[in-house]
Image: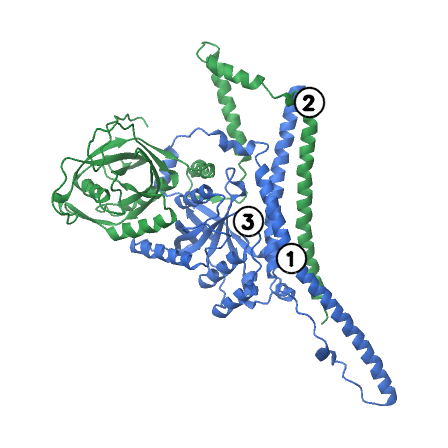
Chain colours: A blue, B green
């Protein structure tokens, strides 16, 4: 589930889309407002079904103040094999449409706004998820995705609302993914996504209820964060995800290295050829003969094409997010460890 | 809940008021469902003549005594005089869509907000008690949200839950619709206690966050770095303070807290062997910390390698002459 995403021809996939949709409009909605019932519904569904991954549709409307209001969340009927798996599936789209039709008959006036997806840390960066999101953002400029990072399950709630950046989508539409294209679009693996702030809104009656509900006693498992070894399993899981992302990264990097070697070889051949032609032309000049074309190498040698940097970008981003999460867990653990050690050894004296 | 409940023998639809020996019933309301209901109900205030109702979804235990309300949706209805028409089709399609994603759940009953149990309540309950895609063959439950005072002022919402089972002889003949009152059963509404629950710790953490930040705020920002560590530590400290205060105030004067004191002192005095061997303990901690630091070090190395590789590739490709 958390493994590397398949390396299969996603190149042909995104070129395919480029033909259908090619117009990018920057988003206008700068915040996401989520009704508290929707927040709890998403969290209930993703955390009850963990470790299965789930995704679903977020429905709502765009308000006048440049915010998207999310009023309904509907999980897709089946768990995801990998992140983004349901976004482009026919059954997922059909389910989403049926929900919309039923709700519109209720007079809610809601529309599809985005998706939610549960994941472990950086594993959400799959080509399926990205392809799905590009398609949505080209159809609806304000489309987004809420990613629920389950690596802190039971300890904290880690939700992020993300959109693909303008740099990413314009590069995607070019579809070439050469280093030069990344440079032209100012795209690196660090700015694939834009974060959008999430606001949670309690309706008045919910607020009134919350203000009057008694504080429930906290159970022991809510204090799991305080446990010294509470991150053990999660850190191991994150490290495994990191390994497999690094493996996929290396697989892609090997292709790239091969290209660079080939390129270098051809390049030195060309330099050699040019030198030879220069000498030849000097000889010819001495003999008063006509000089030979110095640009002829272009038809003799064929330089290898730079392979797409697309997979490299996605893996790099996943690795970066995973590494940050691992570092965070380690920091937490060290803090706790030092505090507990000090306490225990002080008591014993 | 301060109300007391009398537990009657549970009636069911097929054998009304049958003498089966069943225990007390209980309803658990999941917080997300509760919030959904609270978001739907105020629509009633927009149009005072309009009744807002909806379907309750969830799980019923095998003996039919435990209910878990896990979700809810609104069903439009139209009330005219003594009769009410419920949009059957909306209920059906929303339920079937929900069922696809939650195959183990089914219709439990309905919710609404009304200060009286009247003829219309009966008609709606009859709708939910009969036919396919509804609570049948189990008795439906009814959840009433009480959020208005006698003077129509809004107050903190309370939830009253009932099981409504048919009593007496059912109507004879073919049912033609729930509009005609002579085809409806009579129902006895038995109040049953309810409690609000959170299904997972993660959900409870978010629930507490909403609760703690809700006062006087319309919007709560979900910060990306929500570390609960300090919050949790504060809670533990508060617990300990509470306990100390209690002991100071009560425990010295009587023997009734002897068990508590015994439990505490046993917990404090008995410690594993390892804690007494200080050198060994310190070695363990040192080893552990070094392991963690090693993970950090290697992870940082990976992170930097990735960045370095990206930069090198970019500059190598930019320098290419051909």
Dot 1 crowding, Cα within 10 Å, few <14, some 14–19, many 20+: some
In this rendering, do the residues under marks 3 and 1 share a single chain? yes
Q: Secondary structure at mark 3?
A: loop
In the picture of the structure, the residue carrying the numbered disc 1 is A251
Tag 2, which chain?
B
Q: Is residue A30 visible?
A: no
Tag 1, which chain?
A
Choose between A209 and B187: the one closer to the eye. Answer: B187
User: N-terminal of the two: label 3 or label 1?
Assistant: 3
Q: Nearer the viewer, mark 2 or mark 3?
A: 3
- Relative to B266, B146 lies left or right: left
In the picture of the structure, the residue carrying the numbered disc 2 is B278
Q: Is label 3 in contact with label 1 (beta carbons under 8 Å)?
A: no
Residue A272 lies, in percent from the top left, at 80, 74
Q: Secondary structure at mark 1?
A: helix
Residue A17 lies, in percent from the top left, at 50, 66
The CA span between labels 2 and 3 is 41 Å
The CA span between labels 2 and 1 is 49 Å
Residue B236 lies, in percent from the top left, at 52, 27
Q: Secondary structure at mark 2?
A: helix
- Relative to B269, B195 lies left or right: left
Task: Give me the residue at 44% from left, 61% from top.
Answer: A140
Q: Is residue A112 visible?
A: yes
Question: Where A273 sits versus A288, above or below?
Answer: above
Dot 3 crowding, Cα within 10 Å, few <14, some 14–19, many 20+: many
Task: Give me the residue at 17% from left, 47% from top.
Answer: B178
In the picture of the structure, the residue carrying the numbered disc 3 is A2
Question: Which image quarter holds the C terminus of chain A?
Answer: top right
């Amino acid at each position: 589930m958390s493994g590397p995403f398949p390396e299969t021809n996603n190149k042909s996939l995104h070129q395919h889309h480029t033909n259908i949709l090619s117009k990018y409009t920057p988003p206008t909605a700068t915040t996401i407002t989520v009704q508290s019932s929707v927040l709890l519904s998403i969290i209930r569904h993703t955390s009850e079904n963990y470790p299965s991954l789930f995704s679903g549709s977020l429905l709502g409307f765009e308000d006048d103040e440049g915010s998207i209001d999310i009023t309904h969340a509907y999980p897709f009927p089946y768990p995801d094999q990998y992140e983004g798996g349901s976004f482009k599936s026919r059954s997922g789209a059909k389910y989403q449409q049926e929900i919309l039709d039923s709700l519109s008959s209720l007079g809610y006036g809601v529309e599809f706004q985005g998706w939610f997806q549960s994941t472990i840390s950086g594993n959400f960066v799959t080509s399926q998820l990205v392809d799905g999101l590009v398609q949505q953002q080209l159809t609806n400029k304000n489309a987004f995705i809420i990613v629920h990072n389950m690596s802190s399950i039971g300890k904290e709630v880690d939700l992020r609302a993300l959109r693909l950046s303008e740099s990413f989508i314009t590069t995607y539409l070019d579809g070439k993914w050469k280093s030069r294209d990344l440079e032209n679009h100012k795209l690196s693996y660090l700015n694939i996504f834009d974060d959008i702030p999430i606001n949670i809104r309690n309706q008045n009656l919910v607020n009134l209820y919350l203000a009057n509900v008694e504080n429930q006693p906290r159970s022991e498992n809510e204090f799991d964060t305080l446990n010294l070894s509470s991150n053990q399993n999660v850190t191991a899981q994150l490290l495994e995800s990191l390994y497999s992302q690094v493996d996929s990264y290396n697989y892609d990097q090997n292709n790239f290295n091969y290209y660079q070697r080939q390129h270098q070889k051809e390049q030195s051949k060309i330099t050699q050829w040019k030198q030879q032609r220069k000498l030849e032309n000097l000889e010819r000049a001495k003999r008063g003969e006509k000089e030979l074309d110095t640009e002829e190498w272009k038809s003799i040698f064929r330089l290898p094409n730079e392979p797409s940097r697309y997979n490299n970008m996605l893996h790099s981003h996943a690795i970066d997010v995973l590494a940050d999460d691992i570092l965070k867990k380690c920091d937490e653990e060290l803090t706790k460890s030092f505090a507990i050690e000090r306490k225990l050894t002080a008591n014993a004296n | 809940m301060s109300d007391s409940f009398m537990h009657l023998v549970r009636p069911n639809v097929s054998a009304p008021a049958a003498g089966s020996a069943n225990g007390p019933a209980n309803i658990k309301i999941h917080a997300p469902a509760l919030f959904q209901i609270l978001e739907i109900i105020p629509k009633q205030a927009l149009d005072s003549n309009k009744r807002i109702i909806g379907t309750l979804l969830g799980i019923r235990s095998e003996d039919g005594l435990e209910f878990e309300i896990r979700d809810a949706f609104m069903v439009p209805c139209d009330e005219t005089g003594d009769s009410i028409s419920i949009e059957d089709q909306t209920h059906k399609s929303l339920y079937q869509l929900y069922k696809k994603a939650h195959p183990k759940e089914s219709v439990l009953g309905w919710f609404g907000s009304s200060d009286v149990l009247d003829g219309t309540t009966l008609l709606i309950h009859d709708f939910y008690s009969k036919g396919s895609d509804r609570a049948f063959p189990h008795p439906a439950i009814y959840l009433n949200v009480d959020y208005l005072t006698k003077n129509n002022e809004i107050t903190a919402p309370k939830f009253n839950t009932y099981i409504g089972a048919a009593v007496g002889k059912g109507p004879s003949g073919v049912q033609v619709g729930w509009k005609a009152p002579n085809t409806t059963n009579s129902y006895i509404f038995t109040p049953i206690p309810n409690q609000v629950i959170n299904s997972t710790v993660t959900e409870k953490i978010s629930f507490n966050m909403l609760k703690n930040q809700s006062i006087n705020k319309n919007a709560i920002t979900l910060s990306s770095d929500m570390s609960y560590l300090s919050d949790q530590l504060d809670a533990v400290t508060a617990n300990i303070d509470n306990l100390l205060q209690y002991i100071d105030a009560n425990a010295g004067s009587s023997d009734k807290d002897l068990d508590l004191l015994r439990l505490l002192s046993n917990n404090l005095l008995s410690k594993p062997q390892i804690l007494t061997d200080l050198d060994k303990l310190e070695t363990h901690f040192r080893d552990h910390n070094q392991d963690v630091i090693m993970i950090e070090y290697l992870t940082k190395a990976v992170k930097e390698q990735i960045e370095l590789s990206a930069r090198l590739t970019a500059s190598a490709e930019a320098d290419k002459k051909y």
